[in-house]
Amino acid sequence: MKKISIPRLFLALFACASSAIAQEAIQVDRVNFNSLRDDWIQMEIELSCNGNSDPEARDERFVEKIGVKAYLAYERDASPREFDYYTSEVEIIIMEKGDDNNVYFYLPGLIVERDRLKKEPKFYYVEVSVDGEAQNPQKSAMSSSIANLEILNSFVSRADAEGSVNEHLLMPIYLVSGIDLGRVSDLPAFLRRDVRE
């Protein structure tokens, strides 16, 4: 039996992972955290569209009903290994193949000041879904502290279960007003469900 060297095995696994990422309709290119005036924290998620591979798609160039959900876990200053969880989500109406769009979420400065939060959370993950179906997790969509799928699943479960106490505190850009929003560019068209008649 022929032996496979570790580097060659690593490259083969990386190639498989890269091709899986390329097949996703929406790719998370990068996640950034920025400190703003008055202690606000901005989460910036850079997305790109690879087109629609669904055979029933109206047009293969367009992807619709794109859900973007942010999960954050900040370690409590006084209690290591205890976390405060924040979640928020938006829906992008449509993206076209080749589009690059950014999604922004914000944590209020007084919360950051009160809880002495660092700019970047210990754990974060951005879940992307298309027409209600979650895409495969992407390495570029999660913090380096999430080493495997088991840790990711545990983190998402805890954030969903324990994040309700901080519900609505992590806000999408279209709900924030009266502050300096920081550097903002390439916003998509959002479907706003917060408006009711």
Image (cartoon, rainbow, N blue to C red):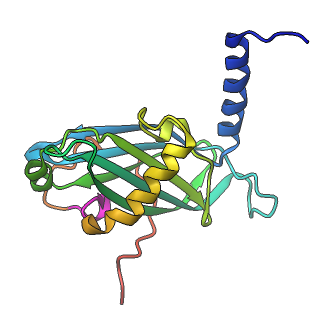
Residue drawn where x is 43% and y is 62% of the image: 90
Asked whether residue 53 is in view, the answer is yes
Left or right: 187 in relation to 137:
left
Residue 180 vertical placement versus 34 (above, below): below
| 19 shown above or below 125 | above
Q: Is residue 46 magenta?
A: no
Q: Is residue 185 visible?
A: no
**Front residue of this view, candidates 106 and 157:** 157
Q: Residue 30 at what x, y percent from top left? A: 45, 36
Residue 110, percent across and down? 9, 55
In the displayed structure, would residue 194 be above or below residue 72?
below
Taking the spot 40% from the left edge, 71% from the top edge, the residue there is: 192
- Horizontal side of 173 relative to 89 (left or right) equals left
Apparent side of residue 51 relative to residue 109 in the rendered image (left or right) = right
**Quadrant for the N terminus in the image:** top right
- Residue depicted at x 35% and y 76%: 194
Q: Give whichever of 113, 82 is nearer the camera.
A: 82
In magenta stretch: residue 172: yes
Residue 183 image position (x, y, % from top left): 26, 41
Residue 127 x %, y %: 50, 52
Q: Quadrant of the C terminus?
A: bottom left
Q: How many marks?
A: 0
Q: Residue at x 31, y 56 (%)?
A: 85
Which residues, given as a range, are shown in magenta? 168-176
